[in-house]
Image (cartoon, rainbow, N blue to C red):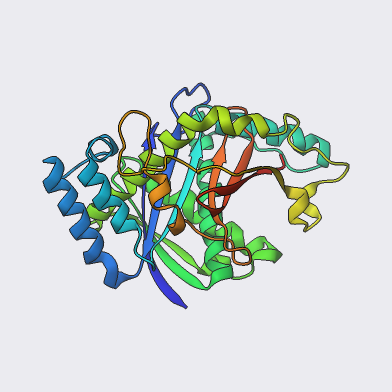
Amino acid sequence: MNKLIGVIDEAGAFRPREDGVEGFGIGAILFREEETNLLVRAAKAIGSRVGKDDFKYKHVKNDAEASAIFIHALQANSLKVFGFYSSGAGVAEKVARYNKAAALYGRVKLETGNSSETEVLLDMFLGFAIGAIACHALVTGYSADLYWDRRNDMDLMKILVDKHVAKLKGNPRLVGAEKTIRFVGQTTAKLNAVARLAGVLAGDLRLYFESHSEKLWKYLDEDGLKAPTDPYRTNNLAASSRLVHTMTEPLADPKPHDCSGSKVMLQGYYKRFLKHPETNCKLISFCDPKGRMGILEIEHGRRWHIRQSAD
């Protein structure tokens, strides 16, 4: 099994919030250990260009040469990237939608217990993100040690991630998924430089969804794809994740190196996103302001699909 390192960082809000107005997104870069130096060199080159080693998305976005270095680094054929974005209070709305569906389908509702509201929402967000990476690792044959950029709640993060990894054991459709990923904790040494790149990735995804939201959210079903029976018990992808629209236009800005204003770099590196094992479409996860979750399924830069997940 191919062994990878995964470095993760977030952009926007520190955690999802019930009353949040700021989007929350994460970017993960997965790579072989021998590729670490390639990414470190790219981060150092960007830092030298923008005059700041601890650079953020805004520094890269506003500099054409730094943008080109970032895009070139992510274009390495063996790299994989993962992205997940939630609008403002989207995760909180997802909890409400899930509990409404739970009453309809006889599921167990999500309860806050003694946890804080932000901890519950962070927990749910991590469940979606870590579950997606673990499932992809299982079906495509790799494992990954995951590291997250500096946070002051890293102990809590590890507890929550480890819980979600352990829960994978109880899913008969995901036998072995819990063995594919291990959450190590905070980045150290060379991986701190890679975390700067992951932060730029997260920032670019956040701006992409926030600047393209009017184009995307209008195609999502208001009722959450309700069905006579629980769509997640049918083992039918078409029932639990429905294709709601196909776009035949550029995914993002055709000139990704020109990142002025609201332009993003996504068009330059979308081919590195985790891909569907059968269709080879590239996948990006999202949660809209109303708590409707889904995936952008990208065939190529001018043909892509919006797929909505049932509540």
Up-down: is 296 above or below 15? below
Name the residue located 38 percent from the left edge and 32 percent from the top edge: 12
Image coordinates for residue 250, horizontal then vertical, percent: 50, 43
Image coordinates for residue 303, horizontal then vertical, percent: 58, 49
Residue closest to the far right: 228
Name the residue located 30 percent from the left edge and 44 percent from the top edge: 257
Q: Quadrant of the C terminus?
A: top right
Image coordinates for residue 287, horizontal then vertical, percent: 57, 37
User: Which residue occupies the foreground of this view, 287 or 77?
Assistant: 77
Q: Is residue 189 visible?
A: no
Residue 7 falls in which quadrant of the image?
A: bottom left
Residue 221 falls in which quadrant of the image?
A: top right
Is residue 244 shown left or right of residue 47?
A: right
Is residue 213 shown left or right of residue 99?
A: left
User: Which residue occupies the foreground of this view, 133 or 217?
Assistant: 217
Is residue 70 shown left or right of residue 280?
A: left
Q: Is residue 293 visible?
A: yes
Up-down: is 177 above or below 151? below
Name the residue located 24 percent from the left edge and 52 percent from the top edge: 69
